[in-house]
Image (spheres, coloured by chain):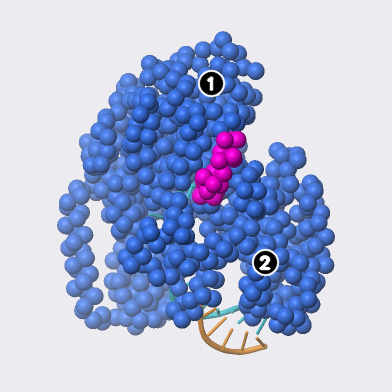
Chain colours: A blue, B cyan, C orange
DNA sequence: TTGTAGAATCTTTTT
DNA sequence: GATTCTACAA
């Protein structure tokens, strides 16, 4: 029980205090960056509990795991144990929680599987292959597009039967097959007793809309609702929270339209803008004073964000003084950027708390160079959601085995494991099994099929025998995990019997991969899960991890600096922020530019710089490796918008955006001309000595490919090997 | 059906 | 540069 006489409004300003004290009814908090938003939410939860609201009656939602953890930690440090009673989750985790608890409303058993994006894509590819064979093979990009379209329909709560009414299919690429694809995909998923990510919101809303009874049960259980980053809610999230809160109307939402960065996932800023219309009795409180950053940092961020036209006009102000002027460091290439940034961060980590330092980047791919550089410096670091641990082949294989044991209807898992390691069940057999499974109307239990009479499926004797063999060891394991088991023993047993251990040991030896090592990591995570949840089953584990991207850590929390994408940094703050890769096409990203969402990129930049309390170090590289070849990079337009007076420049030659624009046009003109002039020298061969205008002399190592795309690898006198597209490279034979 | 070498393709952001 | 796909030998 927490001290009910304690005043949780102490240390808050007037607006924050008002927000905390406004306990009942709808409340909209418009909170600028750094205005103490999280602090206000956390104090509000504490205040509710101290007024006698049971924590179990409170639901609080965030967007990312990182933000949820931050809020959980801070609530705990304020009120202690009662904090654990609050249902504090990400939106998806809340959906999963409800689906797990009310799975009967979908006729699903509790052991359903959750497919990640690559699982979904695989299923879509398969459906396209079998149902639309006349059309030539779909590319990866097309399959991703189909998957995204389906996901975004679900985010907008558009069911397959709604599509013809709500979507103009004539205008939609692939519109002629989309409806059928969507239906089939949903059917396959249901047969597999699986959900995809979008389902965690979509299906939850569907069961709540379908069952009055369920909804009123939930209304009895939950009375208070808080939503962080409300500007980033999509239709499904919005509806979910409306449904849950409509009885008590005790809904508090917090947000900032300038920090809307999930438009690409269906988020609709309109949700926050129309809160007053949804709840006419709503109280609105604005938090405008920034307690985080110095004035110099705010000036820079205000300068950039005001270039967006569609926004509620506001200017943040600070009382923390001017502080240091932000710094822009210009490096010759991405590798140098990583090396020098790592060095600076390491030096700084000796004078301030390492946990107060963050290196931010636009894309996950950029993390690799920083990781390598920090390792060389011996500086411990933490990465959130880097290029996925859970995407590695060995991890996916093992998790597929576990998923299949938990849910023998999961065809994605089944087809992944059936011939891994090789067991003589090739593509032909797989095709036959799939056809046979599809010909059965019932949900098809693949585990039992392994042992069944397979004569009707037209399989070879060899394949049949192989499948029976799998059954003989897999079935006992599957029976065992119905009850709680020792995770470590279970894991080792599975690893050995499946043959994965032998297979990966061999591969590690031959290609010096480290698959066994990462498998070891997975085992650790299972053991950790068991010690955190002593009554947890294998099924619980597999559902739980499906929502988490991995965190890599090379030291303890205290001594590690942090690396993450700008998206992940929202809601957090750091003493020093290194914001890297500020180049056109990287930030703003080229694909965002193409789809006309530069405004969202600008908000993203705004989010990034407003994470900084005292020190902001911007950087860009003049050259960056893209697709294996160097590309010269133009400075980000955001650097111009920030105003040259507002930061110091180190290295490189600063020019204005217009000058660079002209230069770029001249250059592209020159390229056009030069590509029309037949090249005199294209006949390089391995061993030739050559001269490159930027890198000096070198020796040709290899040539690969042919025609216009022919690439050339050259070993230069500085000891580095570089690869170029021959056609675009000014090489002189010596 | 398996293994592999060379070619083609690929990357935005999160759950 | 890294991963995935394709063609072909065994």
Magenta stretch secondary structure, dominant = helix
**Is A324 situated above or below C9?**
above
Which of A229 and A318 lies nearest the eye of the viewer?
Answer: A229
Q: Quadrant of the N terminus of chain A?
A: top right
Which residue is found at the position 72% from the left and 50% from the top?
Answer: A538
Q: Quadrant of the C terminus of chain A?
A: bottom left
Q: Which residue has dot 1 on it? A: A48
Q: Residues within 10 Å of mark 2 (few under 14, many from 20)?
A: few
Q: Between marks 2 and 1, how big is the CA–CA gap?
A: 50 Å
Which residue is found at the position 58% from the left and 13% from the top?
Answer: A4
- Mark nearer the viewer, 2 or 1: 2
Image mark 1: chain: A
Q: Give the magenta range.
A: A200-218
Which residue is found at the position 57% from the left and 63% from the top?
Answer: A187
Give the image location of residue A267, x and y in percent.
Answer: 40, 46
Can residue A341 be seen at all in this image of the molecule?
A: no
């Amino acid at each position: 029980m927490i001290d009910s006489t304690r005043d949780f409004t102490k240390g808050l300003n007037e607006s924050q205090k008002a927000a905390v004290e406004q306990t009942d009814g709808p409340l909209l908090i418009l909170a600028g960056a750094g205005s103490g938003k999280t602090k206000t939410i956390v104090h509000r939860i504490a205040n509710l509990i101290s007024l006698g609201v049971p924590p179990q009656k409170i639901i609080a939602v965030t967007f990312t795991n990182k933000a949820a953890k931050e809020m959980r930690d801070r609530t705990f440090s304020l009120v202690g144990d009662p904090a654990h009673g609050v249902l504090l989750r990400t939106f998806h985790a809340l959906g999963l929680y409800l689906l797990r608890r009310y799975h009967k409303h979908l006729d699903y058993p509790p052991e359903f599987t959750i497919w990640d994006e690559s699982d979904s894509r695989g299923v879509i590819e398969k459906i396209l292959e079998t149902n639309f064979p006349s059309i030539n093979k779909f590319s990866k990009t097309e399959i991703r597009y189909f998957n995204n379209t389906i996901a975004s329909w679900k985010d907008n709560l558009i069911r397959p039967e709604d599509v013809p009414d709500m979507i103009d299919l004539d205008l939609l690429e692939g519109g002629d097959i989309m409806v059928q694809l969507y239906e089939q995909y949903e059917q396959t998923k249901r047969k597999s007793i699986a959900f995809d990510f979008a389902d965690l919101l979509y299906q939850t809303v569907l069961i709540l809309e379908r069952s009055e009874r369920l909804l009123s049960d939930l209304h009895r259980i939950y009375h208070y609702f808080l939503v962080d980053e409300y500007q980033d809610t999509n239709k499904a999230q919005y509806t979910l929270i409306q449904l849950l809160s409509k009885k008590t109307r005790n809904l508090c939402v917090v947000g900032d339209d300038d920090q809307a960065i999930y438009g690409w996932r269906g988020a609709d800023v309109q949700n926050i803008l129309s809160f007053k219309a949804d709840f006419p009795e709503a109280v609105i409180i604005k938090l405008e004073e920034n307690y985080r950053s110095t004035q110099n940092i705010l000036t820079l961020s205000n300068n950039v964000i005001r270039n967006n036209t569609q926004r509620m006009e506001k200017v943040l102000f600070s009382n923390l003084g001017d502080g240091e002027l932000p710094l822009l460091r210009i490096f010759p290439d991405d590798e140098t950027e990583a090396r020098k940034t790592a060095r600076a961060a390491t030096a700084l980590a000796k004078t301030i708390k390492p946990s107060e330092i963050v290196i931010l980047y636009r894309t996950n791919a950029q993390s690799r160079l920083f990781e390598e550089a920090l390792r060389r410096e011996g500086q411990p670091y933490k990465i959130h959601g880097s290029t996925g641990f859970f995407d590695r082949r060995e991890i996916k294989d093992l998790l597929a085995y576990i998923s299949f044991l938990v849910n023998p209807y999961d065809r994605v898992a089944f087809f992944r494991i059936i011939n891994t390691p090789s067991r003589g069940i090739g593509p032909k057999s797989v095709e036959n099994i799939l056809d046979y499974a599809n010909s059965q109307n019932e949900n098809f239990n693949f585990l039992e099929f392994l042992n069944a009479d397979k004569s009707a499926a037209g399989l070879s004797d060899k394949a049949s025998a192989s499948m029976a063999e799998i059954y003989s060891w897999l079935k006992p394991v599957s029976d065992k995990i119905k009850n709680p088991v020792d995770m470590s023993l279970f894991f080792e047993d599975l690893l050995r019997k499946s043959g994965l251990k032998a297979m990966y040991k061999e591969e590690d030896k031959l290609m010096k991969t480290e698959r066994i090592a990462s498998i070891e990591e997975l085992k650790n995570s299972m053991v950790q899960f068991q010690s955190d949840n002593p009554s947890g089953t294998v099924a619980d584990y597999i559902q739980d991890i499906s929502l988490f991207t991995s965190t890599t850590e090379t030291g303890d929390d205290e001594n590690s600096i942090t690396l993450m994408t700008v998206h992940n940094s929202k809601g957090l703050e750091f003493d020093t922020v290194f914001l890297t890769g500020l180049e056109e096409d990287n930030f703003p990203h080229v694909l965002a530019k193409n789809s006309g969402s530069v405004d969202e990129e600008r908000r993203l930049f705004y989010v990034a710089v407003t994470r900084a309390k005292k020190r902001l170090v911007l950087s860009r590289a003049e050259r960056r490796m893209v697709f294996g070849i160097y590309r010269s990079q133009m400075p980000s337009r955001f650097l111009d918008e920030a105003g040259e007076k507002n930061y110091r420049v180190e290295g490189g030659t600063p020019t204005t955006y217009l000058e660079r624009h002209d230069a770029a046009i001249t250059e592209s003109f020159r390229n056009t001309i030069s590509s029309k002039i037949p090249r005199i020298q294209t006949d390089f061969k391995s061993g030739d000595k050559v001269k490159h205008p930027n890198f000096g002399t070198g020796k040709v190592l290899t040539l690969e490919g042919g025609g216009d795309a022919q690439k050339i690898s050259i070993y230069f006198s500085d000891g580095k090997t570089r690869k170029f597209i021959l056609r675009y490279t000014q090489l002189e034979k010596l």
